[in-house]
């Protein structure tokens, strides 16, 4: 059996890797990440498809729909604004980790490592208080240690 320190180090490593991947994905210039892009469902009989449309008044004038469903379109747009920030990405990720059901589905490696570390107290998000998930003390101590080491968040 591995020591607690090795498991914590592995958890930190996996967490940092996953946060970096999310930041890269959600901060890159893409039509999905533009705050003016909305997905519109087009249906024609048995055919249905979602396309990206720009809802910025400066782009879609006179009530006409401007289709923006390729990254090339977003790269050339001077009105592009990213809907995410580094902080919002990290906070959304921590919210997912605090919910055992979501964490287990989206981040199974992290869920297993958390379970190994905190099996005596159950999963970090195992109790509710005031309608919000209350994580165990060990989970938050791990996050504080990670934030101090990383310098972000």
Image (cartoon, rainbow, N blue to C red):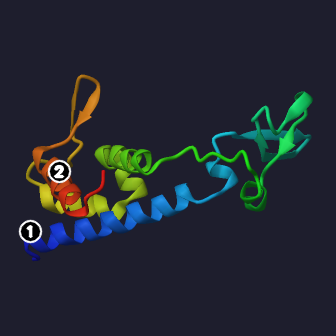
Q: CA distance from mark 2 to mark 1?
A: 13 Å
- Residue, far top: 130
| Coordinates of residue 8 in the picture (x, y in percent) | 16, 66
Please tell me which residue is depicted at 87% across the width and 37% down the height of the picture: 65
Q: Position of residue 72 (x, y in %)?
A: 77, 62
Residue 36 vs residue 6, the one in the foreground: 36
The residue beneath circle 2 is: 139
Residue 83: image location, x then y, percent: 57, 43
Identify the residue at horizontal 35%, vertical 52% (top origin). Answer: 103
Q: Residue at x 20, y 41 (%)?
A: 135
82 over 30 or under it: above or below: above
Q: Which residue is mark 1?
A: 4
Q: Secondary structure at mark 1?
A: helix
Name the quadrant of the N terminus.
bottom left
Is 111 placed above or below 44 here? below
- Classify residue 93 as left or right of residue 33: left
Between discs 2 and 1, the one toward the N terminus: 1
The image quarter containing residue 38 is top right
Residue 145 percent coordinates (x, y): 15, 57
Q: Residues within 10 Å of mark 2 (few under 14, many from 20)?
A: some
């Amino acid at each position: 059996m591995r020591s607690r320190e090795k498991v914590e180090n592995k958890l930190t490593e996996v967490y940092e890797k996953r946060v970096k991947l999310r930041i890269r994905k959600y901060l890159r210039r893409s039509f999905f990440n533009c705050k003016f892009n909305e997905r519109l469902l087009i249906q024609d009989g048995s055919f249905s498809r979602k396309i990206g449309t720009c809802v910025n008044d400066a782009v879609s004038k006179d009530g006409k729909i401007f289709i923006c469903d390729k990254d090339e379109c977003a790269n050339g747009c001077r009105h592009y604004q990213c809907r995410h920030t580094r902080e919002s990405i990290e906070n959304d990720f921590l919210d997912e980790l605090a919910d055992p059901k979501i964490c287990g589905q989206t981040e199974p490696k992290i869920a297993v490592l958390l379970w190994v570390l905190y099996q005596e107290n159950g999963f970090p998000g195992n109790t509710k208080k005031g309608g919000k998930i209350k994580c165990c003390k060990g989970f938050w101590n791990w996050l504080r240690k990670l934030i101090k080491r990383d310098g972000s968040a």
